[in-house]
Image: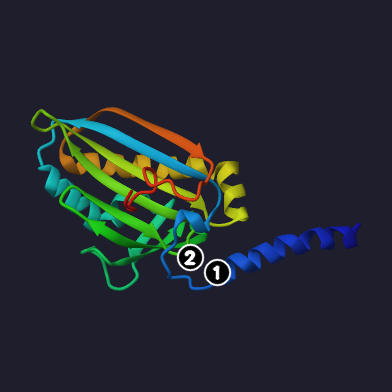
Amino acid sequence: MVRLTSLLALPALAVAALILRGPQEPLRPSTPQEGVGPLTRRRYWAEVQGCTRTPQDIAADWRHHLPQHAPKALAWFRGLDHPVPPISQGDRLWILLLCTRRARVVIEHVDDLDFRARTLRLHPDAGTSEFRVLPGKRAGHLVLQVESVMRNQSHFDRMAYVLGVHALQRMTWERVLDSVAAFSGGQIINRGHESVELPMLPRVPELVAGEPA
């Protein structure tokens, strides 16, 4: 019985060692084509009214203070290349997920109303997350949105996602939206989320954020 238990523990130890060692070229940007499983688009949004700050100020604060907007128990952010804020295009961020899993991203795009982060090889996912402030037609009305287009980095990460990590991701981004909405000075009047999984085709330009059609 003891011998059987020891044999069963070997695969778990091997997986743990692989995770701790990390991938080759850990700071190289990754794409969904490098991942495993279906291509997954996840979108989280919150409709806010009564904002006392401009959409541009909200987007800038969201980017520069992303570490403060994120719940540290779920995703602890800090600068990899320099202390943050500020956070600018080309900056890389160090992330600790669930106090256990290492992750790294690079800010690959910045605009007045949005910014986009791409995963590096040292991350459980492969793809992009985009953070948007979408002004409404009325003054003080807008929509905050987080959209990720990714595949899991490994079969282990895919299994973890299916077993519950997806729920923790949702909780993380909903807390972020709550925090950004509070900074805006407005109140959330509606919110939602959606998740769509598709087979990974050779190219799906309309879904892969940041890639030209």
Give 82 or 199, whichever is nearer the viewer: 199
Q: Are marks 2 and 1 in contact (CB under 8 Å)?
A: yes
Give 156 or 210, whichever is nearer the viewer: 210
Residue at horizontal 31 percent and vertical 52 percent from the top:
212
User: What colouring style does the render use?
Assistant: rainbow
For the N terminus, the image quarter is bottom right
Label disc, if present, on residue 22 of the rendered structure: 1
Residue at horizontal 55 percent and vertical 46 percent from the top:
161
Mark 2 or mark 1: which comes first in sequence?
Answer: 1
How far separated are the C-alphas under marks 2 and 1? 6 Å
| Element assignment for label 2 | loop
| Residue under numbered circle 2 | 122
Give 18 or 126, whichever is nearer the viewer: 126
Residue at horizontal 33 percent and vertical 56 percent from the top:
117
Q: Is residue 136 above or below residue 87?
A: above
x, y percentage for residue 189? 25, 26
Can residue 124 be seen? Answer: no
Residue 6 left/right relative to 178: right
Tell me the kind of residue under disc 1. Answer: Gly
Q: Is residue 54 above or below residue 67?
A: above
Give 62 or 185, whichever is nearer the viewer: 62
| Displayed quadrant of residue 80 | bottom left
Tell me the kind of residue under disc 2. Answer: Leu
